[in-house]
């Protein structure tokens, strides 16, 4: 209330209640201008009360997500393991105005051919605790399942309604919008616009974000009034030790390849760009770079080589000034195609950083000093003897406390190292490595590592390294550089010989071999697709937008001279920041089923003739963007207003 009053210059009174009707009955309340609550509930009750609620913005949670899911649960002793096992079961839905527990749950069950009663005949329980308690209480006396909200699941155990292990999740609905801010008919268009801007600006108020238990504050509504962002949004990062506020609220570290959640999503993007980018500092490198950058609010880390090109040199610079803080240097002789620099992006993990060179050297060092804590050469350690003309390219993956890399050796295709000690936790046999990076995701209800070996796409168990499934593409010869992309509970794979394919997963967490959709006109050599909800975006000589809900239908394609065969994409809300040739930045909106360039900015010292395609991925932390262009690293200040 105080924040909105300050921003809007009006008196604001806040009223809390379980329903809108009850809030309107509170003392001193004579109407409603702004309603913040569960999206589907406000829409339902607001319409009934003729308030004409209009969505303005959606609140992100502690994980940055604006969505929730309905979880279908059974008693832990029940035989059902998946949605398909619920035929003939008694289903307890939530109230009809709770989308995740009713409409989305009915769609999920119907998609698995579970016979459902008419809408008006569905058995419902008002609260998640009621449905969960009844299912547990019935035990094996009834074959029953309940639908609860994903956000409520940990609360049920925390308040003692159920004990840990009492329930088993057998299915999850598609994500639905969670908390939304609505304006009522009491506000005119200008007032609604001012209120919307004030809500979006909460991202710059760290104390308010803490009070709201929100990572990114309120986010823009997509054009259709719904928001379906990935549920694995960036985790919050602790404030700096000095308590200072840096740029955009508390900046989220760009901790590795494709950012903190390995999906290209960032905490914030500007709404405009100057034609000449505002360069805070520029530092020359010894060799033109291929590897990406990792950054915190305090430092920037990347791989380089020494002057005679015989050693790897990982460099840590001050984020504020570009001054060199430390280096990690070790011999790494050899000759690779496309030079010998490290390809992998450094991985920041708490007070440590993991560095991976192109000749297989894996190093864990202290983030503050560069002191080497442990080091090995993964190819020599496991006797990988295959020819690797491009070197080890996959960026290290952190899963829990394990660093996952792919030596590509017969007895160690994939290896997990303990982050603290460097000890081998597990190794799994297989074929030589692919050139892309691995991800970790929950697919088909099973958490798994996903990525390519030389010829095959795999899923592995993160705890043991056991292969869960494998899939050989129909056309061989792919280099498998693009990173797999998670879209909801499906997987998007793009490659130069097999185009772009979308895969489902079965209830056991294994990939369904036949793709659900194929788009033949996107075959990137290098570019990794980036997803916003169910929409996928990728640069390959043009910027392509595909809709995964419509069989990878081409929504729009944007042609521009700045787009090369490869292009790095950062996303926030419905905005994309694309690094093009010569370090040129394009700010692109993806609204109303159309891609449109909002603004573009160029590095002043890059001549038109020096329009190299981007070969590394940038890093963003707060309002600072770190780019690698040619033989230089740039820190670019992004405009706040």
Image: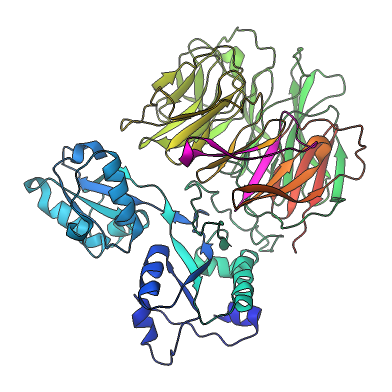
Viewer-nearest residue: 470 or 184: 184
- Find residue 457 and report its horizontal and vertical position in percent: 49, 21
Residue 33 vs 505, above or below: the answer is below
- Figure quadrant of residue 367: top right
Residue at image point 75% right, 35% down: 563
Outermost residue on the left side: it is 141
Q: Say whether residue 70 is left or right of residue 52.
A: left
Residue at image point 39% right, 85% down: 24
- Find residue 322 and report its horizontal and vertical position in percent: 83, 45
Q: Say whether residue 572 is left or right of residue 322.
A: left
- Find residue 592 and report its horizontal and vertical position in percent: 60, 53
- Can residue 63 be seen in this snapshot? yes
Residue 598 vs 9, above or below: the answer is above
| Membership of 546 in magenta stretch | yes
- Can residue 403 be seen in this snapshot? no
Magenta-tinted stretch: 544-573
* Quadrant (top left, top right, bottom left, bottom right) of the N terminus: bottom right
Residue at image point 93% right, 37% down: 607
Viewer-nearest residue: 31 or 436: 31
* Quadrant (top left, top right, bottom left, bottom right) of the C terminus: bottom right
- Find residue 571 and report its horizontal and vertical position in percent: 63, 47
């Amino acid at each position: 209330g105080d924040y909105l009053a300050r921003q809007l210059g009006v008196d604001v009174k806040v009223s809390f209640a379980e329903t809108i009707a009850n809030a309107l009955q509170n003392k001193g309340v004579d109407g409603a201008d702004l309603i913040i609550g569960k999206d589907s509930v406000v829409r339902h009750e607001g319409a009934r009360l003729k308030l004409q609620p209009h969505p303005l913005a959606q609140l992100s949670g502690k994980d940055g997500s604006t969505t929730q899911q309905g979880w279908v649960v059974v008693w832990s002793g029940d035989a059902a393991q998946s949605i398909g096992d619920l035929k003939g079961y008694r289903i307890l839905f939530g109230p009809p105005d709770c989308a995740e527990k009713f409409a989305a749950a009915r769609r999920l069950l119907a998609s698995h051919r579970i016979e459902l009663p008419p809408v008006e005949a569905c058995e419902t329980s008002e609260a998640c605790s009621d449905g969960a308690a009844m299912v547990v209480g019935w035990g094996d006396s009834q074959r029953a399942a309940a639908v609860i909200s994903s956000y409520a699941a940990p609360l049920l155990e925390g308040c003692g309604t159920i004990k840990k292990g009492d329930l088993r999740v057998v299915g999850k609905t598609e994500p639905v919008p969670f908390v939304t801010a609505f304006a009522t008919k009491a506000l005119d268009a200008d007032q609604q616009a001012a209120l919307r801007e004030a809500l979006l600006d909460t991202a710059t108020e760290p104390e308010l974000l803490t009070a709201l238990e929100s990572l990114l504050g309120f986010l823009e509504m997509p054009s259709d009034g719904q928001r379906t962002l990935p549920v694995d949004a960036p985790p919050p990062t602790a404030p700096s030790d000095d308590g200072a506020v840096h740029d955009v609220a508390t900046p989220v570290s760009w901790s590795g390849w494709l950012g903190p959640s390995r999906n290209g999503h960032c905490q914030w993007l500007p709404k405009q760009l100057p034609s000449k980018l505002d360069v805070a500092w520029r530092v020359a490198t010894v060799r033109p770079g291929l590897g990406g950058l990792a950054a915190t609010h305090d430092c920037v880390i990347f791989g380089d080589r020494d002057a005679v090109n015989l050693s790897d040199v990982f460099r840590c610079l001050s984020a504020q000034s570009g001054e060199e803080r430390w280096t990690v240097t070790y011999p790494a002789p050899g000759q690779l195609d496309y030079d010998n620099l490290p390809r992998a992006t450094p991985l920041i993990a708490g007070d440590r950083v993991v560095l991976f060179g192109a000749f297989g050297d894996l190093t864990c060092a202290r983030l503050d000093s560069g002191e080497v804590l442990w080091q090995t050469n993964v190819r020599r350690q496991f006797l990988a003897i295959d020819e690797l003309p491009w070197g080890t390219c996959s960026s290290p993956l952190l899963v829990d406390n394990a660093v996952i890399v792919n030596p590509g050796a017969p007895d160690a295709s994939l290896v997990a190292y303990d982050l603290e000690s460097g000890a081998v936790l597990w190794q799994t046999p297989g074929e030589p490595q692919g050139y892309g990076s691995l991800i970790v995701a929950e697919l088909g209800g099973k958490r798994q590592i996903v990525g390519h070996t030389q010829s095959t796409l795999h899923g592995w168990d993160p705890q043991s390294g056991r292969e869960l499934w494998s899939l050989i593409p129909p056309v061989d010869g792919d280099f498998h550089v693009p990173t797999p992309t998670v879209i909801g509970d499906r997987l998007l794979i793009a490659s130069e010989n097999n185009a772009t394919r979308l895969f489902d997963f079965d209830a056991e967490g294994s990939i369904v071999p036949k793709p659900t959709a194929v788009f033949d006109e996107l075959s990137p050599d290098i570019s990794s697709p980036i997803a916003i909800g169910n929409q996928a975006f990728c640069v390959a000589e043009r910027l392509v937008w595909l809709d995964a809900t419509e069989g990878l239908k081409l929504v729009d394609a944007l042609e521009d001279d700045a787009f090369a065969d490869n292009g790095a994409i950062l996303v926030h809300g419905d905005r994309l920041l694309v690094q093009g040739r010569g370090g040129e930045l394009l700010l692109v909106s993806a609204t109303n089923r159309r891609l449109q360039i909002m603004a573009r900015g160029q590095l002043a010292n890059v001549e038109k003739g020096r329009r190299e395609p981007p070969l590394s991925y940038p890093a963003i932390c707060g309002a600072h963007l770190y780019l690698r262009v040619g033989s230089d690293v740039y820190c670019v200040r992004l405009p706040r207003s």
